[in-house]
Amino acid sequence: MTRPEGQSRELAVRLEELGHEVVLCPLVRIEPLGDEPVDVTGYDWVIVTSANGADELARRQGISSSSRPARPPARSPRSASICRQ
């Protein structure tokens, strides 16, 4: 599995339970690009394509939910859930 370190164990365990041999080989490392707030108040939509992106957007927006878009589209239920928090 090539997911970032710390993000593949749950799936690896499920695959092993199904009888597969799993090799963990992270090829990507997720690093924040900065700490500056991301202001999305001028946009009707903000599209998030991964849970990692949703986590980073939420982190950089701080704790205020007032600056988050009202309708956050996302590729997965987890990304959407993070955006709505």
Image (cartoon, helix red, strand yellow):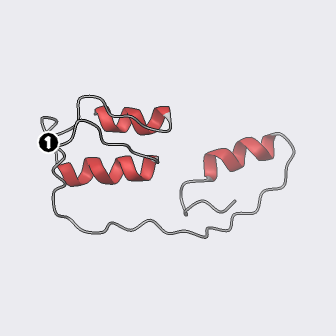
Q: Is residue 3 left or right of residue 52?
A: right
How far across and down, in percent of the image, does residue 57 sit? 29, 50
| Residue under label 1 | 41
How far across and down, in percent of the image, does residue 45 sit? 29, 37
How far across and down, in percent of the image, does residue 37 sit? 16, 57
* Label 1 environment density (alpha carbons within 10 Å; few <14, some 14–19, many ≥20): few
How far across and down, in percent of the image, does residue 27 sit? 61, 70
Q: Quadrant of the C terminus?
A: top left
Which residue is at the front of the view, 37 or 26?
A: 37
- What amino acid is labelled 1 in the image? Thr
Say which quarter of the image contains residue 80: top left
Q: Residue at x 12, y 35 (%)?
A: 66
Q: Exactly how many numbered labels are in the figure?
A: 1
Which residue is at the front of the view, 18 or 26?
A: 26
Q: Quadrant of the N terminus?
A: bottom right
Name above or below for residue 73 compared with residue 35.
Answer: above
Q: Is residue 50 left or right of residue 5?
A: left
